[in-house]
Image (cartoon, helix red, strand yellow):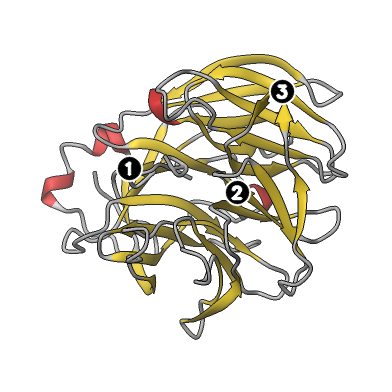
Amino acid sequence: MRRLPIRPFAVLAATGALLLTGCGTETAPGDREASAATGRTVRAHEVMQLTKVHEETGMTLLEGPVFGEDGGLYVVDVTAPAGEPKVLRVDVGRKTSRTFHTDGRGSYTSAQFSPYDGRLYLTDYSHGEVVSLAPDGSDPLTFFSGEVDGSRMNPDDIAFDRDGNLYVSDSRGLSEGKAQGRVVRIDRDGGNAVVLAKNLAATNGVSFDVDYRGLWISELTENRISYLRLDEKGGVASRHTAVRVNGGIAQTDSIAVDADGNLYQALHGRPAMAVYSQNGERLATVGIPAGAEGLESATNVAITPGGTKAYMTVSGPAGGYLYTFDALAEGIRQSNGG
């Protein structure tokens, strides 16, 4: 997530020229010069508006799109005030949405279903908690709360391993501008939390690679994607900077991985995503039409499991929107939520 403003919420917490099949193939003249540096240009198309700017918080910020087994797309609104929809269920076919969950305090920045118990897990950035809901939205539980290695988290995004253990990006230190971000591993029963990596620059996105050998993490205030190779026990064997993102005024937000291992890096401060190969090659830039006014950030994406239809959350003064585009490869768990 992001972002205040749009991100100290998460951050409050939180990119020329052949279009992909289904999006057209015409090369825009203004895109040719940038093509070599940014790969293909993929045009995303509006699906629907989901939220308006909230009077109480002065903004709206959509995040964490994830498909449930029922086919619904679940989206969180980070800045929704008490009583308004904090988690929405979207029927992308009918272009309708409804409230799935609300409460009086949560600032939820991500959502993902656990492979272990099937519940929907949400990170509460402001309160340093991870909560979960039954698949029907009932039975809200606090899964984890408290300090990790002596400090409370500002949990942003989540990645699950195959066994249902959580790997959480902790954006601690963002508001102070200090490199105090962490990656925290929490056992699937919530009983043990350990710091895997620290001194990161506002850790934001987190996703396993295709083979679950390591974690891709985005560091918001350094505009870089780092790679953490894991050992057999789930600890970090090595860590290095994998991609330096040329974001300009935009910053690296959430991250997703498709079936070919490609990285979809959302951009806070620009309604676009940068797509890289696992070897760091810039493959494409996903963007919304130039005439779309009042949209400032693309925070995250969900690619339909087993398909290539992708849904991107985009927000700004115009409200919170859902856009769609054709992904470069099929969706898997690593491109569905987080």
N-terminal label among 2 and 1: 1
Q: Nearer the viewer, mark 2 or mark 1?
A: 2
| Whether residue 223 can be seen here | no
Residue 197 vertical placement versus 274 (above, below): above
Q: Is residue 269 left or right of residue 140?
A: left
Residue 284 can be seen, yes or no: yes
Q: Determine the secondary structure under disc 2.
A: strand
Tell me: 5 left or right of 77: left
- The span from disc 2 to disc 1 (Cα, nearest Å) is 27 Å
Amino acid at pointer 2: Asp
Q: Where does residue 17 sit, x and y in percent of width and height?
A: 25, 48
Residue at disc 3, secondary structure:
strand
Q: Circle 1 is placed at which residue position?
A: 15
Quarter occupied by residue 4: top left
Q: At 24% from the left edge and 39% from the top edge, which residue is drawn?
A: 35
Vertical placement of 111 versus 178: above or below? below
Q: Amino acid at mark 1?
A: Thr
Q: Is residue 222 above or below residue 58?
A: above
Mark 1: which secondary structure?
Answer: loop
